[in-house]
Amino acid sequence: MKPAAVGLLVGAAVGGAVAVASRGPTLVEWPAKVRAGFPIVLGGLAGVTAGVKTGSLLSLARAATGRGSGPITTATPLLIGAGVVGAVAAAGSVAGRRVIGGLAAESRELDPGFATPPQDPDVTGGPGSMVSVAELGREGARFVGSVTSPDGIREVTAQEPVAAPVRVFVGFDSASTAEQRVGLAMAELRRTGAFDRSHLLIQAPAGSGYANSFPVDILEVLTRGDCAAVAVGYGLLPSFLSMNKVQLAAHTQRLLLDSIRDELRDRATRPRILLYGESLGAKVQQAAIPAGRLDLDHYGVSAALWVGTPGGEVADVFHSLCAGESYTVDRPDQLPASMPDPRPRVWFLEHDGDPVVRFRPDLLLNRPAWLPADGTRGRNVPEGMTWKPGITFAAAFVDTMFATNVKPGLFESRGHDYRADLGAVTTAAFDLPSTPEVAERLEAYLRRKEIERAERIAVA
């Protein structure tokens, strides 16, 4: 049988086997077309690769024994192939630049519902601010424009506010360097009296500048406004396109932490320093504090909450560094009934079935701890899901693309959506005052506020 025929048979067999094996359950739901196409695409790639390699190796073996000329008999096919690959790469590069440019432009464009400068002097972009709303970008304008109102505090706590909350945000376009952005943030913190509040939350935003308002809402409500929050942007692109900015982002966070530490060094009274990072923001903030407890002491951090940290060796090492004073939960049910003494200072909220947390390069050839051979599974990890070399890696990668399915006001504790967990976990991690009745009203308030925020975003 000719090498090409053998290659076709091997390719068909391998492709068919991979396609069948690719039809198992995954961590999150996929669109129907993706679900149907995944086995075909993965099987096709595996089949073509196996078939071409088999045919080429057989052809080379025949040529070595003088029975054939090898897989390539002239330079023409090679030149044609190189030309095609070059043309495709050039076209892809141009298209990629256009897509990235479009995404950056979207991040700069303000929602009509958040484009009006705030009237609150205690937030960036308001009266007296050194940063305009236009410089905040879309996510920054949403962040400062979502500050908790006095009515919101009264609704949840049934008490009067202590102060007006402070929200500071400096966008990527607010200045040209990380040093200048942090300098603006510090000036805004001083202007608003943030250092005189009882709590100061430092949040590391995602790649596009997105800073989750949920933990800040919770802090503002439960401290009755006696708090401040600050976030400094480092880019304009979604997190999956911002992995090359982790070092810049970590540098920005470190500058901010250093500046706040220096500001508070000689003060008789200081706010409790709280850290929060979600998804890429968690990775960024952890990269800024690589030595665990020693650096937390260095910066005077009272508590840190990191949510949905992207998985990998770096995350594993950081977890181990914090093991002596950290607590990891999948959901509020796992919070301790009574806090140990000393109270955990570092908190990780990570869903068992979050693809962003579970995906990592070594899934390609190594069975992960969350898919043990004995069949035990964490919450929302399908019972029928098993590890398959190569296939699980590809499926988990696709999972990350559909890990967050957010519907305003409909909180789900699933995948990369942590809204249903943040009320209780943030309250516990930051040691905020609450009661079961307050917690119930807080949950209802957060749901309604998210719907109202979505309505403002949707305004044309």
Image: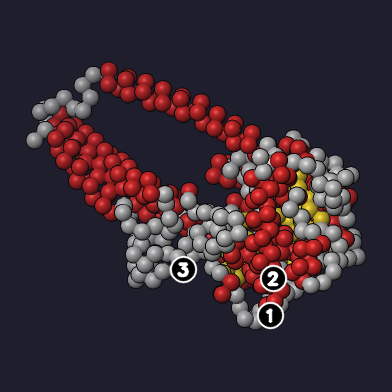
Question: With respect to residue 183, does 294 lie above or below?
Answer: below
User: Residue 141: x and y, percent?
Assistant: 73, 45
Which of disc 2 and disc 3 is earlier in sequence?
A: 3
Name the residue beneath numbered marker 2: 441
Mark in front: 2 vs 1: 2
Q: Secondary structure at mark 1?
A: loop
Question: With respect to residue 340, does 372 lie above or below?
Answer: above
Calculate the distance from the C-alpha at mark 1 to the C-alpha at mark 3: 28 Å
Calculate the distance from the C-alpha at mark 3 to the C-alpha at mark 2: 27 Å
Crowding near the residue tagged with mark 3, few <14, some 14–19, many ≥20 C-alpha atoms within 10 Å = few
User: Residue 362: x and y, percent?
Assistant: 42, 53
Name the residue beneath numbered marker 1: 341
Q: Looking at the image, which is closer to me, 13 or 406? A: 406
Mark in front: 3 vs 2: 2
Which of disc 1 and disc 2 is earlier in sequence?
A: 1
Q: Looking at the image, which is closer to me, 49 or 219? A: 219
Q: Quadrant of the N terminus?
A: top left
Marker disc for residue 379: 3
Q: Do the numbered discs 3 and 2 sit on residues whose CB atoms are within 8 Å?
A: no
Residue found 66% across the figure and 50% down from its top: 455
Amino acid carrying mark 2 in the image: Arg
Residue 151 sits in quarter? bottom right
Q: Looking at the image, which is closer to me, 28 or 146? A: 146
Amino acid carrying mark 1 in the image: Asp
Residue found 76% across the figure and 68% down from its top: 155
Calculate the distance from the C-alpha at mark 2 to the C-alpha at mark 1: 29 Å
